[in-house]
Structures are given as C-alpha cells and as structure tokens.
Amino acid sequence: MPNPKHQTAKPDKPQSSLFRDDLARILDAVNAWGFLEDVKEAKPRQINCFGPKDFRGFVPRPWVGVLLWSKYRNYYAYKTLHLLGIWACKDDEAAQIVVGTKSLPYKLPFFDVESYHYNIQKRFDLHYQGDAAPPPESSRRYTAIYAPEQRLFIRGEIQSTLLAWTAEFN
C-alpha cells in the first residue's frame, strides 16, 4: 500500500487554463483547423497562404485562435500581411466564435528576402507589428455564441464565410 505522505497532490489547473482548454475544444468541434487547411489547399491565385497555426492569449479576455497568414503575390507585397482566423473567446459566461481578418504592417527597417521567405512559412511575428488576438468588431466576418446543439449550423456558417473570403482572391 502506498504511503500517503509520499503522494503528491495534483495541482488544480488555474481558471484561465480551463477557459483556454474549453475554447480549444470548441474550435476543434467546429473544425477550425480543417477549414483553414482547406483554404490553404485551395491555393487562391492572388495570394500566398501560410499556416495554419494555433495561438492563445488573455487580452482583453481569454481566447484561442487558429490562423492563416497571407500576402499578395508580388515583391512589394511584404509590406502588409493579412491574417485570416477563427477564434473562440470567453464572453461573460458564454463562448463566442469569431471569423475575421486583420492586417499587420511590416516592422523591420529593411527587407532581407532570404530571411523573410524562410521565417514567414513558420511564423509571422518576427517581421510584422501586431499579434494574433481576435480582430476588432469592424473586421469580423462572422460571430456566433457557441452552443453545442448549434455546432453543425455554426460549422456550415464558418465554411460559407471562408469560401466567400477565398473567392475574393481567385
């Protein structure tokens, strides 16, 4: 029989960690990663897409997101990077699903083509000013309060929203 003095208690997860885990499960339930993979695989003619990648944060409230980043296909297009993402945010007692876009300006004083093309495939934060937090209200293309019984409806709405975004670049 194990000695109770030598057993260590598992620490409770902090409340914010529980929110983020629940939010990540919600994104999984609505197939956020899969839909963004589909957008990337569609290879829109006018842009290069990178990602998807997951991100987490607390400001202004707990959120988890899956994002693609893209730029137009010309040499000087590096000056602005466009994010497309699906976020799950803690909103009072409910979770909110957000599909939206953000634009980030290039932040370095020079442009090194080799470094840029190597790094942009893995991450965008080295070269661009801004973060992966949910977009402002004006840049949101779809929002919904998540309810498990509405999961399939929300998935359909997200897919339609992403198809319309992709069509803008073909």
Image (tube, rainbow, N blue to C red):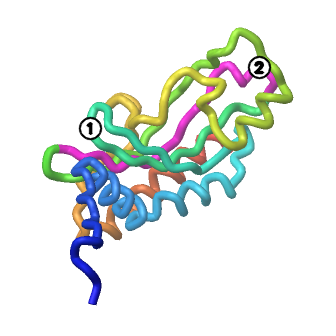
- Side of 24 relative to 5 (left or right): right
Query: Mark 1 highlights which residue?
Result: 61
Q: Position of residue 65 (x, y in %)?
A: 43, 47
Q: Is residue 85 magenta?
A: yes
Instruction: Name the residue: 24% across, 46% down.
Output: 90
Residue 35 location, x and y as percent? 53, 59
**Disc number for residue 32:** none
Disc 2 on helix, strand or loop?
A: helix
Q: Which segment did they paint magenta? A: 74-91
> Could you say where residue 86 lies in the image, as x and y percent from the top left?
44, 48
Q: Quadrant of residue 134?
A: top left
In the image, what residue occupies the spot 26% across and 37% down? 61
> Label 2 near label 1: C-beta < 8 Å?
no
Element carrying mark 1 = loop
Say which of marks 1 and 2 sits in front. Answer: 1
| Residue 161 in the image: above or below residue 131 | below
Which disc number belongs to residue 76? 2
At label 2, counting other C-alpha atoms closer than 10 Å, the crowd grade (few under 14, some 14-19, many 20 or more) is few
- Horizontal side of residue 116 vs 104, given as left or right: right
Q: Residue at x 43, y 40 (%)?
A: 100
Predominant secondary structure, magenta span: strand
The answer to whether residue 114 is above or below residue 153 is above
- Per the model, the C-alpha gap separating discs 1 and 2 is 35 Å
Question: Could you tell me the amino acid type at mark 2?
Answer: Tyr
Q: Earlier in the sequence, mark 1 or mark 2?
A: 1
Horizontal arrangement in the rendering, residue 29 relative to residue 117 (left or right): left
Is residue 16 left or right of 134 when viewed as pictured?
left
Q: Farthest residue in the bottom direction?
A: 1
Q: Report the amino acid beneath label 1.
A: Arg
